[in-house]
């Protein structure tokens, strides 16, 4: 890689003058002084990162200047109210114990953007402060991968509404204390995006936007080391274009991977990113981050340059949309997940390991892998946070490290096979009603689809299933980070077995867990005698308890060994007190001995019920029971 340029390769004052001129900005213009100040701080960093990626290219300087011009223009166009948000020093808002996230598809949950707006009162009832709307931009129908095949980042899918409505919705959500999150699908575009069409027509400049090769020579070479992501869709990572050339498509045949080794692609996508930021988006979910950089002879996942790219995109935000944050969607080995979590890269990250291991513990009634993950992989740098979830719109993959499992005497390959058969209900005694996703007979690989309620067996035994649903959420709500609800799960929505009847969905089992708004279930949410009412009330209780417990802010976690294989324990330290969380993954009562709790003063309070608990007697947890105890550590009392 070329030597990074030192800051003095770019006299930022000189560059700034050139940028202002090109962007048509005069020194006294509105808010320009703010930009100038940030430019001096962040441009040298951007220049260094850009040089590291593209320094050997002849067009490097021109592209960098164009990028800065783009940033300057975007800042000048940014709405005053967004600039107020930029100026507020609440950068760490996401570490609050009051933050609660929800995610939904606009069309399936609320028909369109107006429908989402109409649900704001419900979001407030639920306590949401963060709303992720699944991809809502122009995408070809019906083959759009649920919107993840974007054909224009600047146009809302007309079925859902308009860009003006999106801006209005963002503002109204903001006024109600809810931040809007949307996807930045930046690894690939739809094959119907204007750039892709031009590439398909043979335009050489736009062919360079993608990874296009005249024959199989390079695709074959790359595929030596690259894993198949959607093997049921197409083998390998390339698909043939109508003119016989081959184009990189990691996901579906119609999702073409962008070529970030071309600085023009970075600049073009940075412009799309800033456009979205200016619509009032607070967080971008960085889709498929692991895949954005390709290098021959490597798996083309998690390359060091992927991190440099994210840093560079981040530096662009710091110039032109300072309050915008990134959430990493890296569903990969936990060592690699951790590398994206950095205030200068992705401030937020999904926590796929915790998610998968909640399900693993539920199947095995043994929390050893989950405890190990909390001990070893939970604590992350200041200024960052997890997004903890029980399930998402995607499949559940068993992303734990084989070496972590081996330490506990577990064979990763065999264990994944067991988990897959358990969750598709092929294992005797299983309660789960999942279905396989991307079953790959060549590798033995498989992932799981299913709603939370169906994976917990709500169809069969509602009492235990409700307990399991709440148990799973109790972990996501209390280990530290933003809890993210898949909306509809709070009323126990079930698998949608009709999914294959919808055009374009038949070959993708993830649609089984993306049902339409379950209106009847919502109607029962206040009736405690129904499963819906019990789940809803349980989650509300957790939300309230969490909001009133400062110990549950941030992500810091101290492990706790319950000395009981089925019971998960961890501590969340506050000032003088801490929350001891316990979760019994077995259907049978479990006892935590008084001796195990001797590090705490005997008087404890269960913050979910308000009851006092005497630890001198030990604790008996009913089957599938969880509790959050406010305790005082003995050594703190003494000091
Ligand atoms: C992400 C999305 C997934 C989509 C893929 C391709 O993993 O979560 O739904 O299929 O990216 O965009
Ligand atoms: C993601 C993950 C993969 C996941 C898929 C979406 O980016 O890497 O494991 O299953 O895309 O389904």
Image (cartoon, rainbow, N blue to C red):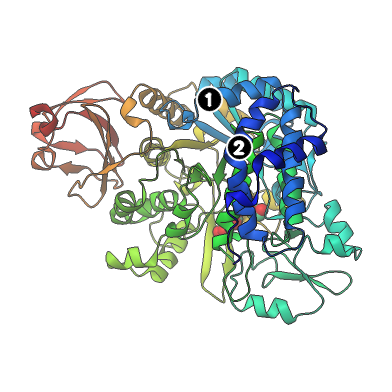
**Residue at image x 17%, y 49%?**
563
Residue 430 higher or lower than 389, as above or below: below
Q: Which residue is mark 1?
A: 524
**Label 1 residue SS:** loop
Of the image marks 1 and 2, the number of the one nearer the N terminus: 2
Query: Horizontal and vertical percent for residue 237?
Result: 68, 69
The outermost residue toward the bottom is 217
**Residue at image x 69%, y 59%?**
260
Residue 232 higher or lower than 346, as above or below: below
Tell me which corner region of the image, top left, top right, bottom left or bottom right, holds residue 30: top right
**Label 2 residue SS:** helix
Quick check: 209 left or right of 465?
Answer: right
Query: Horizontal and vertical percent for residue 269?
Result: 73, 48
**Residue at image x 64%, y 54%?**
50
* Residue 513 visible in the displayed image: no
Q: Which residue is mark 2?
A: 40
Quick check: 162 left or right of 320?
Answer: right
Query: Horizontal and vertical percent for residue 393?
Result: 59, 46
Disc 1 under 8 Å from ligand 1? The reply is no
Query: Horizontal and vertical percent for residue 297?
Result: 59, 76
Residue 615 higher or lower than 395, as above or below: above
Tell me which corner region of the image, top left, top right, bottom left or bottom right, holds residue 639: top left
């Amino acid at each position: 890689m070329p030597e990074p340029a030192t800051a003095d390769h770019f006299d930022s004052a000189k560059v700034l003058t050139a940028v202002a001129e090109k962007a048509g900005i005069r020194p006294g213009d509105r808010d320009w002084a703010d930009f100038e100040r940030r430019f001096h701080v962040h441009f040298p960093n951007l220049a260094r990162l850009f040089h590291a990626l593209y320094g050997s290219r002849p067009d490097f300087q021109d592209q960098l200047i164009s990028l800065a011009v783009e940033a300057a223009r975007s800042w000048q166009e940014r709405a005053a109210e967004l600039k107020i948000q930029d100026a507020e020093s609440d950068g760490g808002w996401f570490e609050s114990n009051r933050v609660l996230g929800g995610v939904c598809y606009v069309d399936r949950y609320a028909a369109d953007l107006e429908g989402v707006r109409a649900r704001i009162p419900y979001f407030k009832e639920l306590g949401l402060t963060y709303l992720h709307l699944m991809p809502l931009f122009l995408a070809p129908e019906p083959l759009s991968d649920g919107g993840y095949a974007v054909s224009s980042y600047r146009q809302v899918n007309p079925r859902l509404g308009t860009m003006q409505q999106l801006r209005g919705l963002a503002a109204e959500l903001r006024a109600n204390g809810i931040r809007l999150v949307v996807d930045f699908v930046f690894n690939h575009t739809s094959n119907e995006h204007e750039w892709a069409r031009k590439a398909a027509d043979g335009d050489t400049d736009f062919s360079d936007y993608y990874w296009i090769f005249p024959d199989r020579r390079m695709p074959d070479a790359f595929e030596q080391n690259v894993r198949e992501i959607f093997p049921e869709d197409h083998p390998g990572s390339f698909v043939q274009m109508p003119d016989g050339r081959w184009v990189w498509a990691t996901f579906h045949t119609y999702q073409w991977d962008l070529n970030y080794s071309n600085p023009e692609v970075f600049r073009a996508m940075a412009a799309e990113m800033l456009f979205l930021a200016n619509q009032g988006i607070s967080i971008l979910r960085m889709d498929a981050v692991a895949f954005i950089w390709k290098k021959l002879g490597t798996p083309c996942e998690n390359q060091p340059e992927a991190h440099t790219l994210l840093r560079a995109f981040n530096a662009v935000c710091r110039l032109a949309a300072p309050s915008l944050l990134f959430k990493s969607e890296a569903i990969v080995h936990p060592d690699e997940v951790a590398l994206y979590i950095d205030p200068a890269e992705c401030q937020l990250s999904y926590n796929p390991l915790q998610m998968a291991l909640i399900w693993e513990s539920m199947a095995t009634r043994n929390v050893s892998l989950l405890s190990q993950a909390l001990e070893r992989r939970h604590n992350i740098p200041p200024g960052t946070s997890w997004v903890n979830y029980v399930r998402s719109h995607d499949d559940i993959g068993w992303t734990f490290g084989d070496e972590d499992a081996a330490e506990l005497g577990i064979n990763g390959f065999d264990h994944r096979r067991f988990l897959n058969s358990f969750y598709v209900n092929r294992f005797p005694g299983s309660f789960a009603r999942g279905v396989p996703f991307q079953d790959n007979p060549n590798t033995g690989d498989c992932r799981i689809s299913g709603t939370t309620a169906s994976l917990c067996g709500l169809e069969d035994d509602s009492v235990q299933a409700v307990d399991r649903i709440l148990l799973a959420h109790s972990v996501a709500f209390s280990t530290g980070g933003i809890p993210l609800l898949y909306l509809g799960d709070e009323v126990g929505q079930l698998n949608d077995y009709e999914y294959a009847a919808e055009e374009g969905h038949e070959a993708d089992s993830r649609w089984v867990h993306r049902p339409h708004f379950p209106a009847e279930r919502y109607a029962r949410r206040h009736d405690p005698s129904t499963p819906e009412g019990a789940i809803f009330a349980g989650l509300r209780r957790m939300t309230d308890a969490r909001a009133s417990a400062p110990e549950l802010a941030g992500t810091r976690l101290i492990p706790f060994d319950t000395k009981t294989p089925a019971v998960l324990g961890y501590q969340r330290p506050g000032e003088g007190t801490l929350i001891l969380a316990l979760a019994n993954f077995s259907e049978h009562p479990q006892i935590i001995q008084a001796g195990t709790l001797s590090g705490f003063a005997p008087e404890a309070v269960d913050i979910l019920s308000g009851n006092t608990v005497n630890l001198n007697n030990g604790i008996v947890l009913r089957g599938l029971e969880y509790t959050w105890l406010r305790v005082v550590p003995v050594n703190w009392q003494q000091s």
